[in-house]
Amino acid sequence: MRNQWNVALVFEEDENRTTCTASLEGFSAPGVRGLGIARRNPDDAPDSTVGEELAAARACSNLAHELVLKAADGIEAHTHRQARLLF
């Protein structure tokens, strides 16, 4: 069996903040999303690349956490016991 999920990153930016939403696409991909936000220090020069990189990293980290929680829910549904997964 082979399955493939792709991560989609969608960015929204304004002058001081970059927001990124990370989601999974593909057959049987769970419907979880991650959110990441990067804020520019007012003393720093604008640089959209840095904001996107940081927001994307945070969104992917949040997505990973949401996947662990979803997996724990699945384990608990099958075992009827509390799952103790480390993240």
Image (tube, rainbow, N blue to C red):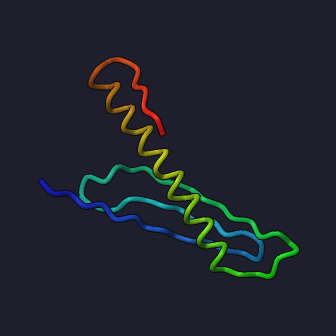
Q: Residue furthest front?
A: 86
Residue 51: x, y in percent?
66, 72
Give how far across and how far down residue 72 sits, in percent.
39, 32
Choose between 80 and 58: the one closer to the eye.
58
Residue drawn at x 48%, y 40% as measured from the top left: 87
Q: Nearer the viewer, residue 32 or 71?
A: 71
Who's the residue at 34% across and 65% down the image?
Answer: 6
- Name, please, the residue furthest toward the right: 43
**Left of 2 or right of it: where is 78?**
right
Count of marks placed on residues: 0
- Residue, x 61% and y 65% (percent of image)? 55
Which of the 4 image quarters holds residue 17? Answer: bottom right
Asked which quadrant contains residue 2, the reply is bottom left
- Residue at the extreme left: 1
Q: Residue at x 25, y 61 (%)?
A: 4
The answer to whether residue 43 is above or below residue 86 is: below
**Residue 28 screen position, x and y as percent:** 26, 52
Counting from the top left corner in percent of width and height, residue 83 is at: 39, 25
Q: Is residue 51 left or right of residue 20?
A: right
Q: Locate residue 59: give its quadrant.
A: bottom right
